[in-house]
C-alpha cells in the first residue's frame, strides 16, 4: 500500500505561484507566506500507522516535519510518474500547486486521487483541469472533497476521515457503520 501526499507548509498569497512541466515544479517562494501545520502531517502519520508506505511532497518542509518514508522538498522539485503510479494520491497543497498535483496524479496513474479543498475552490481548479486536458469523466472520479463524513472539526479529524476513506477503498470497505452492516437491529428484535 502506497500513498503520496502533495502538501505545502506555506500558503500561496496568489493563485498557484508555480512554473511547471510534466515532472518538475518551481515554486515562487516570494509569493507564499507563513509556515503552519496543515492536515498533511496528520495524514502522513495516520497512513504510516496503518501500514502505508508514504511519500510526502512539500516544497517548504522542514527536517522532521513529517512521519514519512520519503519527503521530497525544495522550491524546485521533481516527481516522476513512478512515484504516483498505483499509489493513493492526496492533494493538500494549500493553493500552491493544486492543478499540477492533480494532473500529475491522474496522468501518472494514481489508484485514486483525494483532494482537500472546498467546492468553492474546486470550481476554479476544475476549470483549470479541463484546460489542462483532463476529461469530465476523470474529474468526476476525483474524491473531492476528500474524506468520509465524520463531522470533523479540526486538522487531525479531517486527516482521520481522509485516511479512513483511503483505507476503506484499499480494503473494499463501505464506510458505513458496522452496527448497520452486521444487522444489530435483527439481533435485538430476536431477543
Image (spheres, rainbow, N blue to C red):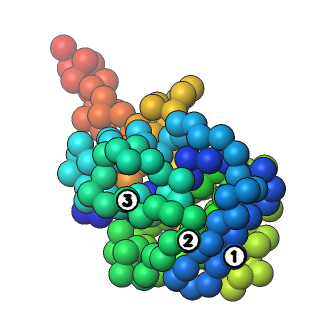
Other residues around mark 2 within 10 Å, as few (<14) / some (14–19) / many (≥20): some
Residue displayed at 27% across by 19% down:
189
Residue 57, position as x, y percentages in the image: 46, 61
- Compared to residue 82, the image places residue 158 above or below, namely above
**Residue name at image x 25 percent, y 18 percent:** 188
| Cβ atoms under marks 3 and 1 closer than 8 Å | no
Q: Position of residue 155 (x, y in %)?
A: 51, 33
Residue 148 in view (yes/no)? no
> Would you say the residues marked 2 and 3 are in contact, meaning their CB atoms lie under 8 Å apart?
no
Q: Which mark is residue 71?
A: 3
Which of 135 and 31 lies nearest the eye of the viewer? 31
Which residue bears the numbered disc 2? 76
Q: Residue at x 42, y 82 (%)?
A: 81
- Please tell me the numbered disc located at residue 19: 1
Q: Which mark is residue 38?
A: none
Q: Nearer the viewer, residue 91 or 25?
A: 25
Residue nearer the viewer, 77 or 154:
77
Q: Quadrant of the C terminus?
A: top left
Location of residue 122 by image quarter: bottom right
Give the image location of residue 37, x and y in percent. 53, 36
* N-terminal label among 2 and 3: 3
Specify which label sits upstream in the sequence, 3 or 1: 1
Between the C-alphas of marks 2 and 1, the distance is 9 Å
Work out whether mark 2 precedes mark 1 in sequence or the reverse, and give the earlier one.
1
Identify which residue is drawn at 38% across, 53% down: 166
Q: How far, Cα to Cα, is label 2 from label 3?
A: 13 Å
Report helix, strand or loop for mark 2.
strand
Foreground: 34 or 152?
Answer: 34
Amino acid at each position: 500500500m502506497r500513498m503520496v501526499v502533495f502538501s505545502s507548509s506555506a500558503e500561496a498569497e496568489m493563485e498557484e505561484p508555480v512554473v511547471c512541466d510534466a515532472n518538475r515544479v518551481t515554486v515562487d517562494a516570494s509569493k507564499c507566506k507563513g509556515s503552519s501545520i496543515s492536515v498533511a502531517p496528520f495524514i502522513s502519520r495516520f497512513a504510516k500507522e496503518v501500514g502505508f508506505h508514504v511519500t510526502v511532497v512539500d516544497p517548504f518542509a522542514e527536517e522532521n516535519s513529517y512521519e514519512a518514508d520519503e519527503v521530497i522538498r525544495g522550491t524546485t522539485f521533481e516527481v516522476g510518474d513512478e512515484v504516483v503510479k498505483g499509489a493513493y494520491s492526496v492533494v493538500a497543497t494549500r493553493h500552491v500547486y493544486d492543478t499540477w498535483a492533480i494532473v500529475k496524479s491522474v496522468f501518472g496513474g494514481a489508484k485514486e486521487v483525494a483532494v482537500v479543498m472546498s467546492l468553492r475552490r474546486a470550481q476554479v481548479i476544475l476549470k483549470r483541469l479541463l484546460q489542462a486536458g483532463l476529461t469530465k469523466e476523470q474529474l468526476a472520479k476525483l474524491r473531492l472533497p476528500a474524506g468520509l463524513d465524520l463531522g470533523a472539526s479540526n486538522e487531525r479529524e479531517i486527516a482521520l476521515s481522509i485516511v479512513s476513506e483511503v483505507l476503506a477503498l484499499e480494503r473494499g470497505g463501505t464506510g458505513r457503520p458496522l452496527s448497520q452492516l452486521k444487522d444489530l437491529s435483527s439481533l435485538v428484535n430476536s431477543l
